[in-house]
Image (cartoon, rainbow, N blue to C red):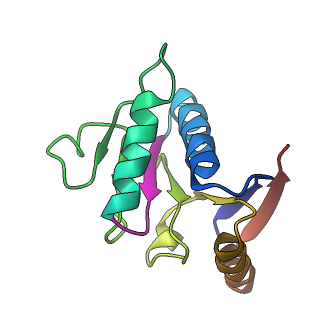
Amino acid sequence: MARIDFYILPDTTLEARLQFACKLAETIHRKGYRLHLHCEDKALAEQADEALWGFRDDAYLPHALEDSDMAESVPITLGWQTLPTPHADTALLNLHPDIPEGVEHYARIAEIINQHQQVLVAKRACWQRYKELGHEVVPHKLG
């Protein structure tokens, strides 16, 4: 069973959620893991891509959209279609409101909750579903 980390932010905005996703991506990358950010659609994946490019002036997180030629050669991918088959050291950051098919192939999964009503409702349902499936769910209340 996977370990699911839920990061609970005090903010309500998408920007705050994406900024935290960048911080988390940096931490995961620094620890030597690969990462797939799963988004609701291509528009959100492109917003996350932009956020990663502008995240830090003094650092670069090598990443690519899943439909890019570079997707196979970078440690961080951003997608919105089906989940890719993970390498043994790949984590999943789920920015989609639902649990995507194929999460059982990932040993570590992160979810980010902010205080926006739609996100709260969707992620509460995800939390309950993960628990029903027998996963270890760990909350991290921030700020």
Q: Main secondary structure of the magenta part?
A: strand
In this rendering, the answer to whether 8 lies above or below 60 is below
Quadrant, the C terminus: top right
Residue 5 placed where, x, y %? 71, 57
**Relative height, residue 130 to residue 18 (above, below):** below
Q: Residue at x 64, y 60 (%)?
A: 111
- Relative height, residue 116 to residue 8 (above, below): below
Residue 86 occupies which quadrant of the picture?
bottom left
Q: Is residue 112 visible?
A: yes
- x and y, in percent, of residue 44 in the image: 41, 59
The mark tally for this picture is 0
Q: Is residue 24 left or right of residue 136?
A: left
Give the percent coordinates (x, y) of residue 68: 18, 48
Which residue shows up at 44% across the image and 74% down it? Answer: 102
Q: Nearer the viewer, residue 112 or 74?
A: 112
94 magenta-colored: no
Please give the name of the residue rendered at 71% of the width and 74% of the height, measured from the top-left corner: 117
Q: Residue furthest left?
A: 69
| x then y, percent, for residue 101 | 44, 79
Does the image show residue 85? no
Quarter holding the N terminus is bottom right
Q: Is residue 35 magenta?
A: yes
Look at the image and give the residue range highlighted in magenta. Answer: 34-41
Q: Who's the residue at 64% across and 47% down the image?
A: 16
111 relative position to 83: left or right: right
Q: Looking at this rendering, what residue extends furthest in the top direction?
A: 58
